[in-house]
């Protein structure tokens, strides 16, 4: 953008800042327990999460049960991003005016210290990721966090030891795994649809539990789906960004 | 099954998008067509349900709103959702020959993202929850970036800019929703509408303005249209017809829904709506003027879209029943005719390889059906009866007179005249001029029509333009008027 | 009493944001941006949003930074 | 300075962050930096929502062991947290796609500076 415009762009920015400062007066005081946000919809979540949705962690209850449709959308956003990266960078033919890209990060940093340290860390990272998913109902965490940590662990392997060493995952396979993960989510919803309930209503699941416990299992299934999808897509994006996606 | 139709409108394309990779990227086109036809079927059946028995509310996960998320299919959202799926079916049919030379995986990925785009757009239309709308807005935007970026290196630069501006828009929208949440404590549209304070609080005005800014960027309203011309000009043939036809319109629809179903149209904040009105008047004129200056047909259509989005926004801003009828009718009509124009022009480009107005000389002899469809849609854009475009402009003009804003009427008439100039220029070249400078010596008069799978959607859309015009009265009384806010 | 601490971390975030936009070296800017994410994670923790802080630490501070670094590695480090 | 005043200060700082992000998208010539500006802007929105959900003297929204009838007053509002988890996911997805586009742009045009890019596009 030429300097002329960027100098003028101060005007709307300043105006925006003043407007934002001005309206801050009308907001409820931070921490006010009587603010509309804290008194209208959310009390029900706090009171019912454990008894009705089976999860003491209210964030997980809202995420995987009350607003599970949003979370389905969120997982689809991730999948879209993975497919988008594949369309943009993967499997496209290099034309004559696009030179060979020498700077691919397929080698890894390779120092012995890094290698030894990461060998120590990675099993714990992976274990922790699984713990985070399974215990998402009673402590902070859930499918998305677990998937992100798991993917970060795998990325650590690739960064230190090179792409060939850490769980080789071809781009096409990663997409299929991600779709399978989301399909677990979607399938759970469709199952309740087929059994005559509403989409994603976990009360319909054919398991020998009732009430909160049944819903807890429903949302756990869904979280596992999210975990698989998130791990696969984050790895896919990482691979595409570092080395392109060779056929 | 049928009581689940509202959610199946969205789930059909979503399942299709997941199935294509799961089947190893095979059968991309077949799965896409099947899932989109299913989506159209469910869309039409829930529309019929809402017309006969009132709005359909579907509570997801079995939680009643405002605690859970609900899907609302009333006559308005039913019409728009069916429009989106119908255009998607035709565009999927049209895209076939373009993708013939692609690798299996790339074509499969393309179709999968295309299904995701449709599910994102449909999700925006049918949701009854403000935050859920944001999620689907992001799905549709991300998949649109991906699809538009397949058009070559210039398109990638345009798409990067679109991505930045689009994310700013989404952030503005989300901040506006945050302000509303701070005021009311709910995200459900109907519940929020009941709980919003009825006086002019500053927060309310600012929240409404942020939502208007965010969605107006996505709808490419004039001063915020920067991303659109380049993104559409360099867009790849198989999708530009669909994206240009419905994407901006879905954002305009979302804006309409929030302004008239969440905010109280009488007691709510007026200032953002006033601003919207004047911005759209300028958009109507400026879009047409800029279209006039273009030598590239695709770019000309892109600028003309900016003007046409101004029409829709103008109707929303005036807000009388007549104006809203015109706006909704123009959403339908413009989607059909712009889809037809973009598909016809890209067909010409694909077959003959030309985009400039001058190179269209003698094109009517070579591609008679395509150019015939182009002409019908162009006449409709200009607003000649009995094509569809005439009637939506007629309603908007009546509304402008009724509201006493004669400058609005003046802008409408001026833009129609300008539209006549720039469209007749293309038609003149195609029908009357012969090729002065024959590039391919003997190919000049040879008839080489498009493949059937491309020609059928183009001609079907042109026929739809005429049908929408001829049966305009039925469309308005049966579909548009029941969807007006009470 | 956490209110002053909350404000402190917000100020740190603002400083990091400005520094990330002002540092000439892109790689340094990305590292500062990682610090920005990390401060925001602490901010969320202070306000009791443990899940959000968790996600921000894993995604914002780790994965987004890795994405940025790998993209800069393949393009130009200093362009300004 | 009282706590009441600090409350407004937090909203102001979130607003400042939002505008810094907006500036970061508009002003810098480098596209990677614009992307950082975009991320800062999204974080500002998240900060706003999280600030909104906070309650004085309440604990994070995880029911204490054995607390079978949670009292609303004792727990922080979980809804903004849920929404912002989604927003973070959206943010990382957008960043990933944008970086892929940037690598493509750099391969083709050899630069990530907007003025140079516009020069080359002519």
Image (cartoon, rainbow, N blue to C red):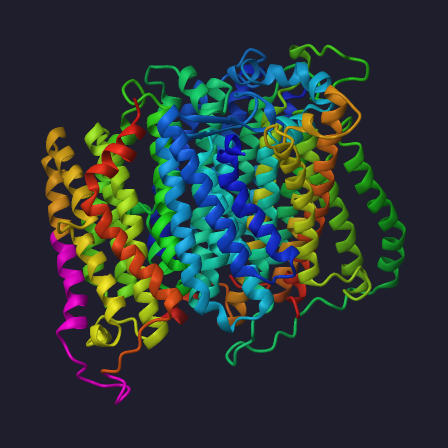
Across and down, in percent, residue A174 comes to 69, 57
Q: Is residue B332 found inside the magenta-colored segment of the image?
A: no
> A15 above or below B295?
above
Across and down, in percent, residue A200 comes to 63, 32
Magenta highlight range:
B417-444
Across and down, in percent, residue B16 comes to 56, 50
Image quadrant of residue D65? top right
Across and down, in percent, residue D26 comes to 42, 50
* Residue at left offset 55%, top offset 49%: D94
D64 and B188: which is toward the camera: B188
Q: Is residue B419 found inside the magenta-colored segment of the image?
A: yes
Image quadrant of residue A110? bottom right
* Residue at left offset 65%, top offset 31%: A195
* Residue at left offset 60%, top offset 69%: A91
In this view of the protein, can residue B41 be seen by the observer? Answer: yes
- State which quarter of the image contains the N terminus of chain B: top right
């Amino acid at each position: 953008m030429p300097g002329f415009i960027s100098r003028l762009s101060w005007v709307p920015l300043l105006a925006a800042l003043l407007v934002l400062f001005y309206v801050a007066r009308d907001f409820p005081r931070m921490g006010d327990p009587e603010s509309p946000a804290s008194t209208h919809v959310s009390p029900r979540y706090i009171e019912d999460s454990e008894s009705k949705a089976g999860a003491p962690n209210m964030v997980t209850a809202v995420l995987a049960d009350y607003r599970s449709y949003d979370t389905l959308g969120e997982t689809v956003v991730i999948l879209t991003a993975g497919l988008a990266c594949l369309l943009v960078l993967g499997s496209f033919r290099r034309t004559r005016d696009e030179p060979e890209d020498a700077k691919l990060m397929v080698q890894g940093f390779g120092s012995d210290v890094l290698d030894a340290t990461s060998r120590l860390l990675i099993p714990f990272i992976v274990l922790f990721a699984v713990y985070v998913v399974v215990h998402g109902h009673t402590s902070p965490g859930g499918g998305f966090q677990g998937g992100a940590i798991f993917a970060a662990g795998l990325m650590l392997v690739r960064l230190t030891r090179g792409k060939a060493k850490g769980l080789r995952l071809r781009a096409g396979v990663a997409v299929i795994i991600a779709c399978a993960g989301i399909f677990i989510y979607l399938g759970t919803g469709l199952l309740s649809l087929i059994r005559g309930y509403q989409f994603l209503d976990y009360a319909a699941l054919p398991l020998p539990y009732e009430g909160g416990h049944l819903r807890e299992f429903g949302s756990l299934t869904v979280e596992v789906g999210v975990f698989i999808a998130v791990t696969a897509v984050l790895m896919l994006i990482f691979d595409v960004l570092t080395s392109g996606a060779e056929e | 099954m049928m009581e689940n139709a509202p959610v199946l409108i969205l789930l059909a394309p979503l399942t299709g998008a997941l199935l294509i990779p799961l089947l190893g990227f095979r059968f991309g086109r077949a799965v896409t067509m099947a899932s989109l036809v299913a989506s159209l079927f469910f869309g039409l059946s829930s529309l019929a349900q809402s017309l006969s028995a009132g709005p359909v509310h579907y509570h997801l996960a079995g939680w009643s709103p405002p605690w859970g998320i609900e899907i609302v299919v009333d006559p308005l959202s039913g019409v728009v959702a069916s429009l989106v799926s119908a255009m998607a079916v035709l565009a999927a049919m049209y895209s076939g020959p373009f993708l013939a030379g692609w690798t299996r995986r790339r074509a499969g990925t393309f179709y999968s993202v295309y299904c995701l785009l449709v599910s994102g757009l449909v999700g925006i239309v049918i949701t009854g929850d403000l935050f859920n709308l944001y999620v689907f807005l992001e799905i549709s935007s991300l998949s649109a970036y991906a699809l538009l970026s397949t058009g070559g290196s210039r398109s990638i630069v345009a798409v990067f800019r679109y991505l930045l501006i689009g994310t700013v828009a989404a952030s503005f929208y989300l901040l506006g929703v945050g302000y509303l949440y701070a005021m009311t404590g709910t995200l459900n549209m109907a519940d929020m509408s009941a709980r919003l304070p009825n006086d002019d609080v500053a927060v309310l005005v600012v929240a409404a303005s942020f939502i208007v800014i965010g969605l107006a960027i996505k709808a490419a309203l004039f001063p915020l249209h920067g991303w659109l011309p380049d993104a559409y000009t360099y867009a790849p043939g198989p999708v530009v017809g669909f994206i240009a036809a419905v994407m901006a319109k879905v954002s305009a629809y979302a804006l309409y829904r929030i302004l008239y179903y969440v905010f109280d149209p009488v007691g709510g904040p007026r200032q953002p709506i006033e601003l919207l009105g004047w911005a759209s008047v300028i958009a109507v004129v400026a879009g047409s003027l800029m279209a006039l200056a273009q030598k590239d047909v695709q770019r000309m259509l892109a600028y003309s879209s900016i003007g046409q989005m101004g029409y829709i926004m103008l109707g929303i801003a005036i807000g009388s029943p007549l104006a809203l009828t015109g706006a909704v009718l123009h959403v339908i009509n413009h989607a059909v005719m712009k889809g037809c124009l973009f598909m016809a022009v890209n067909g010409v480009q694909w077959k003959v390889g030309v985009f400039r107005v001058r190179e269209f000389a003698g094109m009517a002899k070579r591609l008679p059906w395509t150019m015939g469809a182009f002409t019908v849609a162009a006449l409709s854009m200009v607003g000649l009866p009995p094509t569809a475009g005439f009637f939506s402009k007629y309603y908007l003009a009546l509304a402008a007179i009724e509201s006493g804003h004669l400058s609005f009427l003046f802008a409408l008439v001026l833009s129609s005249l300008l539209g006549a100039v720039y469209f007749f220029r293309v038609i003149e070249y195609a029908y009357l001029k012969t090729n002065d400078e024959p590039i391919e010596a003997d190919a000049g008069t040879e008839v080489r029509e498009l493949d059937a799978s491309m020609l059928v959607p183009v001609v079907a859309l042109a026929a739809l333009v005429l049908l929408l015009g001829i049966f305009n009265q039925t469309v308005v009384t049966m579909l548009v008027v029941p969807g007006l806010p009470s | 009493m956490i209110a002053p601490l909350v404000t402190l971390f917000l100020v740190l975030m603002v400083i990091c944001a400005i520094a990330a936009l002002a540092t000439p070296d892109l790689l340094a800017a990305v590292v500062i941006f990682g610090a920005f994410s990390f401060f925001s994670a602490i901010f969320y923790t202070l306000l009791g949003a443990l899940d959000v802080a968790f996600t921000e630490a894993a995604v914002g501070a780790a994965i987004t930074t890795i994405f940025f670094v790998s993209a800069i590695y393949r393009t130009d480090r200093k362009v300004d | 300075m009282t706590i009441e005043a600090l409350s407004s200060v937090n909203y102001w700082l979130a607003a400042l962050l939002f505008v810094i992000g907006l500036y970061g998208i508009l002003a810098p010539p480098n596209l990677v930096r614009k992307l950082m500006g975009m991320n800062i802007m999204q974080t500002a929105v998240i900060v706003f929502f999280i600030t909104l959900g906070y309650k004085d003297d309440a604990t994070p929204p995880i029911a204490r062991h054995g607390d079978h009838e949670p009292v609303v007053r004792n727990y922080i509002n979980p809804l903004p947290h849920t929404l912002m988890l989604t927003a973070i996911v959206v943010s990382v997805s957008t960043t990933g796609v944008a970086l892929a586009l940037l690598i493509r742009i750099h391969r083709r045009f050899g630069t990530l500076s907007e003025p140079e890019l516009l020069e080359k596009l002519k």
